[in-house]
Amino acid sequence: MTNNQQVLKFVNESVALCQPRNVVWITGEEAQLEELRKEAMATGELIKLNQDLLPGCYLHRSAVNDVARVEGRTFICCKNKEDAGPINNWMDPKEAYEKVGAIFEGSMKGKTMYVIPYSMGAVGSKFSKIGIEITDSIYVVVSMNIMTRIGTKVLETLGDSNDFVRGLHAKAELDAEKRYILHFPEDNTIWSVNSGYGGNVLLGKKCFALRIASYQGKNEGWMAEHMLILGVENPQGEVKYIAAAFPSACGKTNLAMLIPPELYRRKGYKVWCVGDDIAWIRVGADGRLWAINPENGFFGVAPGTNMKSNPNALLSTQKNAIFTHVVHNLENNTVWWESMDKNPPVDALDWKGNRWTAECGEKGAHPNSRFTAPAINCPCISSEFEAADGVPLSAIVFGGRRAKTAPLVYQARDWNSGVFVGSIMASETTAAATGAVGVVRRDPMAMRPFVGYNMADYFAHWIEMGKKVTNKPQIFNVNWFRTDDEGHFIWPGFGDNLRVLDWILDRCEGKVEAEETAIGFVPKAEDINIEELDITVDTIKELLTVDPENWKEEVKGIEEFYAQFGDRLPKELNEKLEELKNRLN
Ligand code: GTP
Ligand code: SPV
Ligand code: MN
């Protein structure tokens, strides 16, 4: 399929290591993909769902121990340990190739090896980048076909260039003890073994588009971020773009495709989705930041997705989608998950494939059960989804899950204050990664698990980028997750989050005043539009409070976090921390 000597060398070396029975190059043609789906159905790897209700849709299960990213087994393998930094797990590249090479050795005996050429970003666009993923999993092939642009056209675009990311994946035994997700940023290489879960094996996603790309971006002067991108169209038809970074399972997909509240719809507001998880951001000739979504589909959280919370996401999954670890509804051969509706199926299998009914008290779908769905299925996909230069950003928004402390929204004073705001982000952990759920941890820019180098250098890169952006977006922080004394969310969230974006865009245009606090600018309570909402201005006031005592506690956590980086932490951030402390006193 190609004469590219570097690609051939990579494939040949992978064959020598994994020893597959045969090698199949993925062309991207529907006939080939359909053959593979049939083969996967025969082995049970894919289950074909009701084609009248869910045309082109399949169900897939990995192993019970394989339902989330494994941060403890994810490594950055660069020559110097200091370059991986204190947040990443590090392995010496030579040791990593040897140790994990032994696990790959012979792992594809008797199996087929698939070679998937893929493009992150529209094929041939100057911002796009190419990867080759080698895998023994048909689930990976058909999912990469949804999540990225794959096939012959990508190899044609690559020509004889060596500028591609090498990704090697083997399911092997799905042995959690021998599971490794390795990144070699200095070699443009990713190795993933013993997993079949999306975030660990769809190598274009977190592995390439964030961990490797963040390293490339640092060296090449651009940014790879864990951000959704959306456009808000006002009644005059003007569209302003916002990129927002929230940690895993903290609301990116929901915000990216939100449906405006009735009030806003009547006025003529629309929201357009450009991306729901990853943004590659560059400085344009006009001195603004421009963002593309390098992906071609959504890998979304299923539980909680319903016609009320996120109809656009649900509608995106109604054709050509693949579901993992959800309930298999045997009544009509469809899928179900918690809070999809109030009618759990009676005749059903749970995410493990065991007989299940809602009465048993256990959840039927895994909390991190997901779907891969083509972006073009989304009813509000932006006309700029494939735009070669991306979209210009008016605002960058950070946010996390905080029961207290962080107000509904605040604005940073300037770019470096915004970098500080991003760097001190903290959020309660979710089911998207293995480990405890609901524990507050620092997750700067929602990138804690995804920066492919030293996080202190990543902060420095943000500060450097700010110097190149002459027409800067404003930077904000939001928190949809403040709770009352009974633990209920106070803010209605979802579509009503547009009310906060409305204030954010007004601030960007200098149309609305704000109140200065120790941490930045918060809205005047009456400036958050609560028309037709069942809450009062007093509730908004409560949501906007900045409690100095809470923030003094927060400062301790920030100091502890910063201390890990020693001298490598940019001095600008220490200055911002000192400023915050002074304002609090
Ligand atoms: P990843 O795909 O892991 O990166 O997650 P994500 O950031 O795209 O999160 P997603 O939009 O899938 O939301 C995750 C969970 O947060 C779901 O259970 C949602 O129902 C819930 N959620 C999203 N937005 C809101 C909100 O505004 N308020 C509340 N209370 N919950 C929300
Ligand atoms: C996340 O965990 O942030 C996801 C899902 O978007 S995964 O692809 O598993 O990383
Ligand atoms: Mn994500």
Image (cartoon, rainbow, N blue to C red):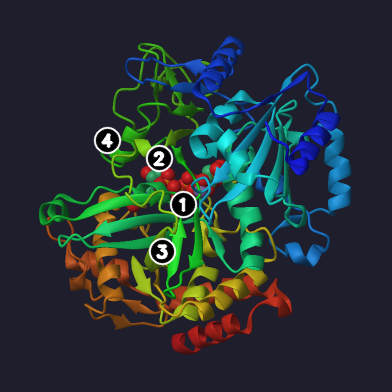
Tell me which residue sits at (38%, 14%) in the image. Answer: 50
Out of 455 and 14, give the one closest to the viewer: 14
Instruction: Please give left or right for residue 443 compared with residue 402 in the image.
Output: right
Q: Earlier in the sequence, mark 4 or mark 2?
A: 4
Q: Earlier in the sequence, mark 1 or mark 2?
A: 1
Tell me which residue sits at (32%, 15%) in the image. Answer: 52
Residue 388 in which image quadrant: bottom left
Q: Are marks 1 and 2 in contact (CB under 8 Å)?
A: yes
Q: Earlier in the sequence, mark 3 or mark 4?
A: 4
Vertical comparison of 327 with 483: above or below: above
Foreground mark, 1 or 4, reads 1
Foreground mark, 1 or 3, reads 1
Task: Give the Cα separation between the discs numbered 1 and 3.
Answer: 32 Å
Q: Earlier in the sequence, mark 1 or mark 4?
A: 1
The secondary structure type at the circle numbered 4 is loop
* Type of the residue with mark 2: Ala
* Type of the residue with mark 1: Asn
Mark linked to residue 293: 1
Residue that carries the numbered disc 3 in the rendered image = 404
Residue that carries the numbered disc 2 in the rendered image = 375
Tell me which residue sits at (36%, 62%) in the image. Answer: 242
Mark linked to residue 307: 4
